[in-house]
Image (spheres, coloured by chain):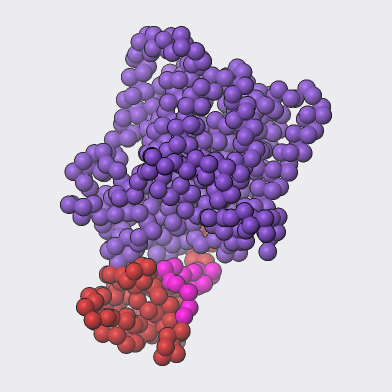
Chain colours: A purple, B red
Amino acid sequence: MSKAVVAVAGVLGLAAYIFIYATGVAHPPIRSDGFSYYVYLPSWFIFHDLSLREVARDCCGGEFPEFSAIIRWPGTRRWVNAHPIGVAIMQAPFFLLAHLLTKWSNLSPDGFTFYYQHSAGLAGLFWMVAGLVALRRLLLRQFNDRITAATLFVLTFATSLFHYGTYDSSYSHVYSFFLFSVFMVLTDTWYRSPRRFTSWLLGATAGLIVLTRHPNALFLVVFPLYGVTRGEALLGRIREFKRRLPDLLKVAVAAALVVTPQLLIYFFATGRPLISSYGSLGFNFSEPQLFGVLFSVQKGVFFWAPILLIGVVGLIASRGMARSFAFPAGVFLIVNSYVIASWWDWQFGASFGHRGFVDSYPLLALGIADVFDRIAHRTMLVLATSVVALTAAIVSTVQMLQYWYHVMPMSDTTWEQYRAVFMQLR
Amino acid sequence: MKRAIAIVLFFAVAGLLAWLRDPAWLARMESGFGRWERATDGVVYRWTAGRASFFVPADLQAIEIPLRLPIQPGDWPAVVTISIDDRPADRLVMAEDGWETRRVLLPPRGARRLRRIDIHVDRTRPGNRGVMVGEVVRKP
C-alpha cells in the first residue's frame, strides 16, 4: 500500500507538472532561487568556466539580474553565488541528458532553452519521489505498511511538499527532503547494523546536505545525538565514537571530499574558503519572528500545514526507532526554527506555506507515524483521524491551487485576505 | 519477456529520437523574449534578454529583423550578434536610438526543415533587457 502511495505521488506529480507548464500557470522552472541553484551547470558544462563569468555574459549581458542573489565580491569583483552547488550536482544527470537532446534537436545550447528548463523542473520532482522512497524505507523499519502509507499520504498532500515537487521544483527544498531522508536511513543503519559502505555514504550525504543549503548543516546534529535520551547515553555515545573511530574518520573524509569543491569555488572568487555568500543580507538573531514562522497567517508552518503538529506531538511521545530520533529532532527543530525566524526576510519571499521547513518533514514524518501507530487499534480514533487527515489534504490542495492561480497572495497574507478567499479558486 | 520489453524500449527510444531530430513543433519554440508591447511610434516589439532565439522555415531566402535600443545619454552602446544555427550572420553596434532593420540571408536549405536564429546582446539594461525586436519579416 505504501508503495502505491509513492507511485501515486509520482504520477500525480508528473500530471500536475505537465498541467502547470502546458497551461502557463507558472513561468519556466529556472526562475527566482531556482536560477541561482541551477546556473552552475551551464557555466561548468557549456562554457567550461568555474567563475560564472561566461554564463553571465551569455544569458544576461554580463551582469546577473538582482533577483538572482549572485553578487560581485567586493575587492575581487568575481561572482559569488548565494546558493551553493549541491542542487546543481543533483541536477547534473538531468542537465546532461537535456544538453544532448538540445544539440540533437538544434535548440539553442545556451543552458536555458526548453529541455534545460524541464530538466531542472523534473529533477526536483524526481528527488521528491526519491525522498518518499527513502522515507518509506525508514518508516517500514518500525511501522507497518498501512501506517507508512498513511504517513506518506499526509506528508505529500496535507503539507507543501507536493507544491515544492511540482510548481517550485527547481528550489532546494525537495533536494534537502531527499537528503535528510537518506541521512536518517543511513544514521539508523550506522548504529544498528553498519554495512561496508555505510560510513562513506553517510559522509557523502552529509557533505551534500551542506552543499545544498548551508544552514542545513545544523541537521547533521542528528548523527551524534541519535539514540541519546539521557545524560548517560551521551557519555556512552562518546565511548562508542572512540571505539568506532575508523568508521567516524570515513564519514569525516567523505564529507570533506564532497564539500571541498565548494570551498575551492569560494576561495577562487574571494580569496577565502569560508564566506557568508549572502553578502550584506543576514540574520537578526536578537529579534527572531518565531510566532511568524510557526503560527502566523503570513507563513506559519503550522498554520498552513496543521497536520505537522501531530508530528511534533508524536516525536515527544515516540517509541522505538522514532524515539532514537526524537532528541536530535528536538534540538534541530528548535535551533532551525530560531535561525529561520532570524533571517532578515523571515517569510522567505514568495512561498506556499513556509518553505524553510520543508527540509525537516522527514523528522516530523516519524512523529506522525508514531501517533498513527498508537491509535491504530482504536476504530473511532482511526475514523476521526482519517477524516482530519483527508480534510487537511483537501484544504492544503485547494490552498496550493489558490497560490498557483494567485488567488492567495504570494507573501504577507492577512487574516482578512485568507478568510475572504477560503476554499475559493477564483 | 525481458528481451521483448528491451526490444520494444529500444525501438521506442529510437523512434522518439528520430522524431525529436527535426520536429515541426520547434517552429513555435522561442526563448529569451519578453511579452509583446507597443512603442510610442506604434511599432509592436518584444525585449530580448541577453540571448533570445526563434526558428524560421529553412527554405526562406532571407529574414528582416527590426531592432532598436533606446540609448540614453551616457549609456554604453551594445553589440548585437545575429547567428543562424550557431554561425554568426550579422553583427552591429547599437549606439543610437531608432529602429534599424537588418536583412539576414539564410543559407540553402539543409537536412532540417527549420533554422534557428539567435540574437545575442553583449550588455543588458536593468531587468535583463537586451534589445527591442519588432515583428520578423520572412522573405521566401
- Based on the displayed image, in which of its 4 quarters is residue A371 positioned? top right
Residue A243: x and y, percent? 37, 8
Q: Is residue A261 above or below residue A188?
A: below
The percent position of residue A228, horizontal first and vertical second, equals 49, 16
The image shows residue B79, relative to residue A388, as above or below, that is below
Between A302 and A90, the one lying in front of the other is: A302
Which residue is at the front of the view, A325 or A337? Answer: A337
- The reply, left or right, for residue B91 in relation to residue A99 is left
Q: Quadrant of residue A106?
A: bottom left
Magenta-tinted stretch? B24-37
Q: As drawn, which residue projects farthest toward the front?
A: A286
Task: Write the residue at 35% across / 29% down.
Answer: A255
Residue A394 seen by the camera: yes
Location of the N terminus of chain A by quadrant is top right
Q: Nearer the viewer, residue B18 or A7?
A: A7
Magenta-drawn stretch contains B72? no
Q: Residue at x 52, y 45 (%)?
A: A292
The x and y percentages for residue A362 are 55, 33
What residue is at 32 percent from the left and 87 percent from the top? B98
